[in-house]
Amino acid sequence: MHLDALETPALLLDRPRMAANIARMQGQVDRLGCRLRPHAKTSKCLPVVQAQFAAGAQSITVSTLKEAARFHAGGIRDILYAVALAPGRIGQALALRAQGCELSVVVDSLAVADALAVACAEAGTPMPVLVEIDSDGHRSGVRPGDPLLVAIGRRLAEAGLLAGVMTHAGSSYDLDTPEALAAMAVQERDAVLRCARTLREAGLPCERVSVGSTPTALSATDLRGVTEVRAGVYVFFDLVMAGIGVCSVEDIALSVLATVIGHRADRGWVIVDAGWMAMSRDRGTASQRVDQGYGLVCEPEGQPMPGLIMRAANQEHGIIARRDGSCLPELAQQLPIGSRVRILPNHACATAAQFDAYHVIEDAAVVDRWPRFGGW
Amino acid sequence: MHLDALETPALLLDRPRMAANIARMQGQVDRLGCRLRPHAKTSKCLPVVQAQFAAGAQSITVSTLKEAARFHAGGIRDILYAVALAPGRIGQALALRAQGCELSVVVDSLAVADALAVACAEAGTPMPVLVEIDSDGHRSGVRPGDPLLVAIGRRLAEAGLLAGVMTHAGSSYDLDTPEALAAMAVQERDAVLRCARTLREAGLPCERVSVGSTPTALSATDLRGVTEVRAGVYVFFDLVMAGIGVCSVEDIALSVLATVIGHRADRGWVIVDAGWMAMSRDRGTASQRVDQGYGLVCEPEGQPMPGLIMRAANQEHGIIARRDGSCLPELAQQLPIGSRVRILPNHACATAAQFDAYHVIEDAAVVDRWPRFGGW
């Protein structure tokens, strides 16, 4: 089937680009001597994860227990749930273990470490637990040097649950030079290595040392002591990643196909049938050097149309215009009503979540349809 | 079932508040002597539309043809598809008419008016068409005074399709005083009345004169000459509407229930298991006088917790903190791990779209579960 036969808005996944992105990250993590544990929250799609496994991955990261259950049902065994476990979710996590899922979980509080120790003992089910470390102050985790780390580690170790430490340098998303990114990769690594040493010096085990974000994973040059790297968005890449500098616009494998439904020639606007419901409300490039609006506009075959972005979005309307605000009268002729454009997203995780399936393309041919799931 | 038994994040719909919102808008539009045509894009949920019908509505507006098909299958007949029709969608629209749906559509170009005239003649199926008018320069439509209006109207009338004119004063969302809102309601009304007069003076029919947005609908005092009012978000209301001043925070019927999963007491942060995947990335209050972050935090029973908002969001993490940035050390005691909060959304249409169902509540009791649909 040709691309032209799709109804719009449609979510497109360029398979050759995805394959190149997967190979690039797998090669990078292999060279660093670590295991790659792709974050499946980006795709929420079994065939995508299967492509990551075909390239060498043997485990995944997830952001919800629903992802864990779905991917386990699809044959994936080794799964890290990388959001601090809520006490009310312990039963679900234990049920997954009982079904044969090699689930591991994350805690950053004594309260949940304690609840887990009690629940695992009662159930007679072990559960490998990583202590979340705050390596950059952006969100959750125990700070290196905080005595809480050993307290949590000891409580978990007493119950036979302590597996190691993990961190996510999410503030790497705010950087945009190779030097700053490389420094952040070092900072992320050093934070977990210090915490692993602290645990071991306290006589506690620390087998797994896990780091990761797409920008730091691609910027690291020495991860000795780290056992695994987690990264998610690299599988598709997006405009935020291009703005950070870890991919080019030509690497972005995800886009939204849209149809022109109107013009405001006096303002230089082209109206398309993809609004924020299709692109998501993510404006991650707003704080970057190049603001891409709600997305960068490309020809239907994928070539970027220089300077053209989705400037504004309503629920089902996107307003396409020049980034610099200039009014190009010939735009209406160039993009007549009924013609199509492809729009690259700011944030692949957010845009993909607006759709229930990927239309898998190779050049202009639609070769498959891969379902994705949402919800909790 | 008590609210406490729900897994989080969960989308809550307070039925008494919704009923009051529906009654308020129906009463307002009744007083103005118009028909209310609720926009179902907000709820995408048949029981919500049925509640609007029980209160007096007899027709709906939709933003996609999927909504039209779903609501028609649910027994709703009179449906306006209020996004300019793409030529490639004409066949679908005609198929809905052939199934007995009283569908009407919107155009703002001669190209689509012409394509519709040809397709309707070929199919032998009439299709009432409204010409979209630009009353405020915010998006699509023919400007009042543009000779294009009569050209489109004539082409449609020749084919027996011209039903009237419609507009949507979307820039009412940028206002926040009763005076400015009342003036925008007048501007919206006057733009379509002028265009209706233009068509009639050209000897063309203009039976339907349709206006609408929640802020202008609630601010209008005289809509003589207008036949119908469209409004969507009023059914739930949200923080953007509260910021505009057309509802109070206590009117907001939609919220997200979340569980505390961690703390950063040193920063005054409480981490919950609802991030942007639950709240959406909508930051509609960022440009208002009171920035509500990703949402206003309430007790699980619904009372707002003064000054507490979701300051930042990752995919499955929300960071709750004081709006003024001050660090309240007792917050961690007030909201221990495992406790719950309810978060009011910036934009009801965007937040609801992140879920596949509403948990319908009355006080703290969950009394029903209403599915909603997404996609195109």
Image (tube, coloured by chain):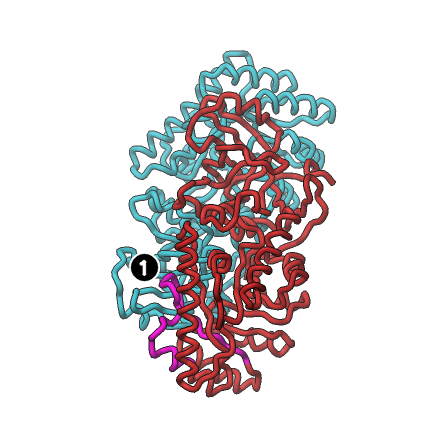
Chain colours: A cyan, B red
Of residues B279 and B130, the one nearer the viewer is B130
Residue A12 visible in the snapshot: no
Relative placement, left or right, of B65 versus A158 is: left
Q: Percent position (x, y) of residue B244?
A: 45, 49
The residue located at (66%, 23%) in the rendering is: A115
Quarter of the view holding residue A185: top left
Q: Percent position (x, y) of residue B360?
A: 67, 47
Relative placement, left or right, of B99 versus B120 is: right
**Type of amino acid at the residue the image marks with label 1:** Leu
The residue located at (69%, 49%) in the rendering is: B369
- The local crowd at label 1, few if under 14, some if 14 to 19, many if 20 or more residues have their Cα within 10 Å, is many
Which quarter of the rendered picture does the C terminus of chain B lie within? Answer: bottom right
Instruction: Inspect the magenta stretch and tell me whether residue A7 lies in it.
Output: no
Instruction: Inspect the magenta stretch and tell me whether residue B138 lies in it.
Output: yes
Q: Percent position (x, y) of residue B315?
A: 50, 41
Residue A332 visible in the snapshot: yes
Q: Percent position (x, y) of residue B256?
A: 58, 42
The residue wearing badge 1 is A308
Q: How many marks?
A: 1
The residue located at (47%, 19%) in the rendering is: A195
The span shown in magenta is: B127-153
User: Does A56 sit above or below residue A259?
Assistant: above
Q: Chain of mark 1?
A: A
Quarter of the view holding residue A91: top right
Which quarter of the rendered picture does the N terminus of chain B lie within? Answer: top right
